[in-house]
Image (tube, rainbow, N blue to C red):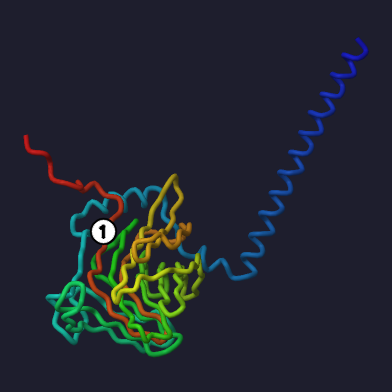
Amino acid sequence: MQYGHELVRQIEFLRDSQSLAMAHLRNIRRYVGVIVLTLMSMSGVESVLAVPKETSTEKAEHLRQQANPQLFNNWTFDKDQAGGVPKGFLAVASGDQPGGDWKVEAQSAAPSSPNVVLGASSCPACVELLVAQGFQYEYPELVVRIRQGADATSGQIGVVFGLKDPKNYYATVVDLSQKSIEVVRVIEGKESILGRAAIKSKPVEWHTLRVQRNTIISKDFVETFFDGSLALSVEDQTLGVGQVGILVRGQATARFDNFNASPLYSSRPLSAPAAY
């Protein structure tokens, strides 16, 4: 009996110790949370939080709007007038030193001839955007053919999405000279690199860049494919619905063709109904 009482006493002691340890752990987590918020405020991270996140109601409405058939676009630029900005697009500067140019250019060797879009950025700090007008995407899938030239030694090219304005957006950018790819987030003009990876480019003139913004169990993430291979996947939920487009950054000249944008989630059927 004495052994039984001693065993009960030890069990109660261990249980009380465990409860005390859990209480201490909760306090530690609370203090850490306060410290993190304080450091974020001191370091200026509040600018990220200044962009209002979508509520669940807003997200549901944005997803409902993705059923719009007009969101399924494939811009080949072949019917646009050479020398000007393609119809339905607006050229804007994101950097502090605008110095770029966008125009349709005739090129018979393009993936879809006769036209491509030529983008040029003339300074290291320049970020030039060409944004599709009239379309808002929550979870877009973007595919574009890109060519920078074998002699390119600087600058990056890519796509933008979730764009609220020229100072707030996501971008996936490729540096062909350094054989690297990045996903960045720009908030109030301040850029944060969400992820970076090395890429292996195929020995071709025209490369394929594909970007998907996806969601699983309330977590949003961006997957980037280069020349058919998954290159980078990052998670972020800061920005919601927005416009899409293409970009050149730094001292760069690049050509774009077959820019395709579509909603990753919609109620549009993938094929025609079966005939009965």
Query: In which quarter of the view is residue 205 placed?
Result: bottom left
**Residue 202, located in which quarter of the rendered image?**
bottom left
Left or right: 251 with respect to 119? right
**Residue under the point 21% across and 59% down:** 72
Quadrant housing residue 115:
bottom left
Most distant residue in the top direction: 1
Give whichever of 63, 142 is nearer the camera: 142
Q: Position of residue 134 (x, y in %)?
A: 23, 67
Residue at image position (45%, 67%) is 183
Picture coordinates of residue 160, whole percent (x, y): 36, 69
Q: Is residue 83 left or right of residue 199?
A: left
At 41% from the left edge and 67% from the top edge, which residue is drawn?
170
Q: Is residue 82 above or below residue 192?
A: below
Q: Quadrant of the N terminus?
A: top right
Q: How many marks?
A: 1
Q: Residues within 10 Å of mark 1 (few under 14, many from 20)?
A: many
Q: Which residue is mark 1?
A: 262
Q: Position of residue 192 (x, y in %)?
A: 51, 70
Residue at figure coordinates x 43%, y 80% from the top left: 177
Question: Which residue is more in the foreground, 72 or 95?
Answer: 72
Q: Is residue 138 left or right of residue 239?
A: left
- The residue lying furthest to the left in this view is 276
Which residue, as the protein is rendered here, is positioned at the far right? 2
Q: Compared with residue 2, is residue 65 higher up or lower down, i.e. above or below? A: below
Screen quadrant of the C terminus? top left
Q: Observer-nearest residue: 200 or 1? A: 200
- SS for tag 1? strand
Give, as a three-letter code, the residue at label 1. Ser
* Residue 275 in picture, x, y percent from top left: 7, 38
